Image (cartoon, helix red, strand yellow):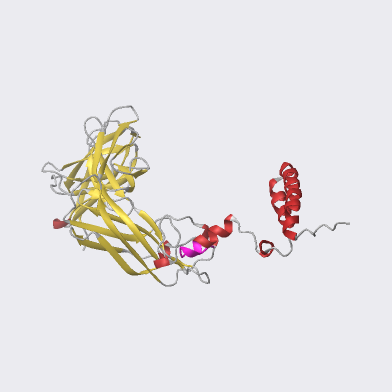
Amino acid sequence: MSIQPRACASERRPQRGRAGLLVLLVLLALGGGAALLITSGFLEKGDPAAARPAVTQDDTESAAASAAGQDALTGISSEGRIEVGAPMPYKDLPRSFEGLGRISGSLEMVGGLEFPPHWTLRIEPSKFGSGREHATSRVIEFDGNETTFDETDLPLGGYTVSAEAEGLNSRPQEVLLFALPGTPTGGKTHVHLLLQLTPAGFVDGSVRDAAGRPVADLPVILEDASDQSLRETQSTAAGSWRFEGLRDGRYRIFYGSHERPLIPPRTFTFNAPQRLLEEDEIPVTASVAFFVIDKDGLAVMGAKVRGFGRPGGRVQSISGPDGVAIARFLPAGRYHVQADLAEENLAGMADFELRGDEELEPVQVVLYPRER
């Protein structure tokens, strides 16, 4: 009787491998995920691969993140504490604003424009972002040969960063400096920015009254929401108006006066180079003349006439040589005005009611000596 040599383990493995392949094909029809799990059990007990854990895609990405100096929990680059435009999975982690941070960056021109001889960097508390209550303001002036900036010792918090020069501005960028106690990165305490100067733009608008007529010579006031600064112009005969040299940001438009506008102010966001606003409508208004006299009935020149109406309207004028002062763009309502001639210590007051655009007789204001 011939004795067949015993098959070695290596010779038996292909058979088991074929069985495993058959099972794999069946399981693939049922569900690919379960098949991968079951087939791993067909490895021999002594095979080194059996003791080696499977490497998943998540493990590969975590390893790559570690190699790049990133915290797998936050996704923030730990090298130099620099993170610009990265996702924010850390938004639900407890943040701390204790400590100091740094904002650095560079400035470049867009479209081949010549670099300005002087420019300004603005670092201001964010208007809407978190941490803004911890931020501080800095305004730094630079010469044209300086194209980089590096501001240190900034309290951690929410900031808005922008650059501007005469006729030029950059789009504001939101920055959040914060600490993440107990994480490998420690948070984000340094941000590096690229700011680009572009030509400042202009905004156009127009205004009509409730009767559909264009309103000429109406004071139009522009308020910059970033610093509450005011600029004023007047509407043309066609009711149109324009403000030029605007940097990107939020603004408000007032008609008539800033203190008592004819309609609620319009708020808008501006991005260069231009924007055209929808036409606005104000109530029908009228002009009122004031006749300022002294107690003897003589015309008083140079008296300041000021007052307000309800619900709106503002009176602000100065009497001429004939004692007449004119106030324009007054809507219907009840008014109280005061007049005074400070150098002669004279003062007086008057009340009147205006209905629509009716022609009103001059309102007489008598000045009397003030009691000392």
Q: Quadrant of the N terminus?
A: bottom right
Percent x, y of residue 114: 18, 49
Which residue ends up furthest to the left in the rendered image?
321
Q: In the displayed structure, would residue 29 be above or below residue 80? A: above
Residue 281, quarter of the rendered image? top left
- Residue at horizontal 58 percent and vertical 55 percent from the top: 57
Q: Left of 330 or right of it: where is 62?
A: right
Magenta stretch, main secondary structure class: loop
- Who is closer to the viewer here, 296 or 11? 11
Q: Is residue 8 left or right of residue 251?
A: right
Q: Residue 191 location, x and y as percent? A: 38, 62
- Where residue 335 appears, as percent x and y from the top left, is 32, 43
Residue 41 in view of the camera:
yes
Question: Which contiguous range is marked in magenta?
Answer: 65-72
The vertical placement of 122 against 348, above or below, is below
Left or right position of 370 against 309: left
